[in-house]
Image (cartoon, rainbow, N blue to C red):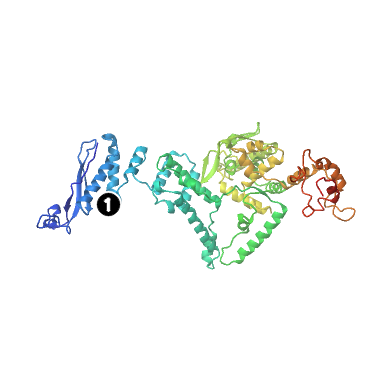
Amino acid sequence: MSCTLTGNAFRRCKCRENGRELGSKCPKLRRKDGSWNPNHGIWYGKEELPPGPDGKRRYLKLGGFASADEVTACFQAIGRLLDIPDAGPDGHEARMEILTMIKAAHRKRAPMPEYEEVQRKYRAGQPLQAMTFGEYWERWVARRRRLKDIRESTLLGYISHHDAHFGEVLDQIRLDRLFAPKVEEVFARIDEKNATLLEGRKSPDPEVRKAARRRKPAGPATKQRIKATIRTVLADAQREHLVGFNAAALVTLESAPRPKGVVWTEARCTAFEKAFQARLAAVRADPALPSVSAVSVWGATDLRPSPVMVWTPAQLGAFLDYAASDRLYALYHLIAFRGLRRGEACGARWVDLDFDDAVLTVARQLTIVDRKVREGRPKTESSDAPVALDSGTLAVLRAHHRRQRKERLASAGAWLESGRIFTQEDGSELKPDWVSEYFERLVFAAGLPPIRLHDLRHGAATLYLAAGNDMKTTSAMMRHSNQAITSDTYTSVLPELARMAAEASAALVPRRVRVGTPSETGGPPSVPPRRLIGCRLQSLRKPAGHSGDTGAPCRIRTCDRRIRSPVLYPAELRALSPYCA
């Protein structure tokens, strides 16, 4: 079907007579000689369009042109655009969409849709109308919620990234014109916010300083997660042929390596205690700051050598001894020795625990989603592997079972049966956030250096390796999806094992003189040159076929007295070398 349109240009105005608009019948539109009056009226064009499947006649009328030639040129371009879809009913919907785009562009005094772009999109099966990133984002979020192919907590994290960081920069950008420099503006804006936040913490205004301290600057890891969110959205847009490439994948950011576990050695504990006391004194001395507890200052992560800290076996034992009488002792014992995640421990059920086979199956976990406790599947596919239990952990769980039965009997019918191994005092489910806060208070009361509850899992991996298990076995016991996660993040070398390894490696080298022990003469220890010469005579022989005038011989370094150190190359050794003058 060919839409050859000319527009049938005509002029009309808004003049009225007896309350009625004269339109094209206004006598002022033409001069006395019959020519058009250029100072009165506006050029319009009107054309009949191909009928739709229902057979109804359709017209296109546009105005606001400066001349008849402009009307003709515009309608000819419209005809070319309407020729892009297939002829007949198959292309009717696309023609109506193109027509909507034409009317919207004309109403906004914007350029007409480009022929090549519309043709490319139609052939690729893409939506013909330009879509902004913000419009696609709303559609993308609605689809994720409908399909439920992303964890709800993950989706809420994506929405948080959009609302706080990249939405204000990208929402008004056309999706097909979203390039890498525009994505880079997101992170430039984040850097500006970080700078403003750090300046606010130094402000003389106590209110500004107080507001700035409540917020946290976005670090390299947060930026990487924001980039990953944008990349995920654009990857779906690319699969739908809405964009030709993923602009976020072309953006380079500062790397954010995984934080590795650091052991709380005695020196680190001493340094932390000094920093903690200094911070606590400074906070309590500032009248502009609200009163804070010592626990909140003690728990500040910036005082720790690393975000991930690991206790020594002695420190872990001290904590377990202190918490032995606590009603949730079994939970912390299970995490510390068997490496369960917080949500897995809170979601563990009695039905999944087999005392006879000494196995706990991790089937469910509890997480916090939008400030509510939600039950769901474990984190990864490998997370639901059975957890082998040692005899000590089994004894602890049996004692906890007896304690829970006593609490149920004492509740006089008010017990809430949740089926969980670890519950609140009324039988209801534990809130994971509360479990972490309670653990932090226990650690503070025990007088130990701070760690997160999840750091007990890091410590369990370290204990596995310290017990002589290889990396593959440790990764399987931690139920990781691959060994790289175990080796890169979850293992730390205990100081005692590090010293033993250092002594063992040093003992492999035979030594006759111990550096650091006093010598008989009182000078630096040395090895007699003759012994060294006797061991190296074969290497000092002149190689066969060597002329001696083509440079340094094989395996012999220079004997130049201006270069050669007399200490490292004594006279006795130089005398034996055939290459020394």
In this view, the residue in front, 431 or 528, is: 528
In the displayed structure, does residue 429 sit left or right of residue 262?
A: left
In this view, the residue in front, 221 or 529, is: 529
**Please, what is the three-letter code of the amino acid marked with disc 1?**
Arg
In the displayed structure, does residue 123 sit left or right of residue 557?
A: left
Outermost residue toward the bottom in this view: 204
Local secondary structure at mark 1: helix
In the displayed structure, does residue 344 sit left or right of residue 462?
A: left
Against 12, residue 383 (above or below) is above
Q: Quadrant of residue 457?
A: top right
In the picture, the quarter occupied by the N terminus is top left
In this view, the residue in front, 569 or 173, is: 569
Tell me where residue 306 appears, x and y as whole percent.
63, 52
Tell me where residue 187 appears, x and y as whole percent.
49, 53
In the displayed structure, does residue 154 sit left or right of residue 123?
A: right
Q: How many marks?
A: 1
Q: Disc 1 designates what residue?
A: 107
Against 483, residue 178 (above or below) is below
Q: What crowding class fits label 1: few (fewer than 14 Cα within 10 Å), some (14-19), or many (20 or more)?
A: few
Outermost residue toward the right in this view: 520
Q: Quadrant of residue 292?
A: bottom right
Residue at (15% x, 57% y) in the render:
37
Tell me where residue 392 appears, x and y as whole percent.
70, 38
Tell me where residue 419 appears, x and y as whole percent.
56, 38
Q: Quadrant of residue 391?
A: top right
**Res. 282 in view:** yes
**Res. 300 in view:** no
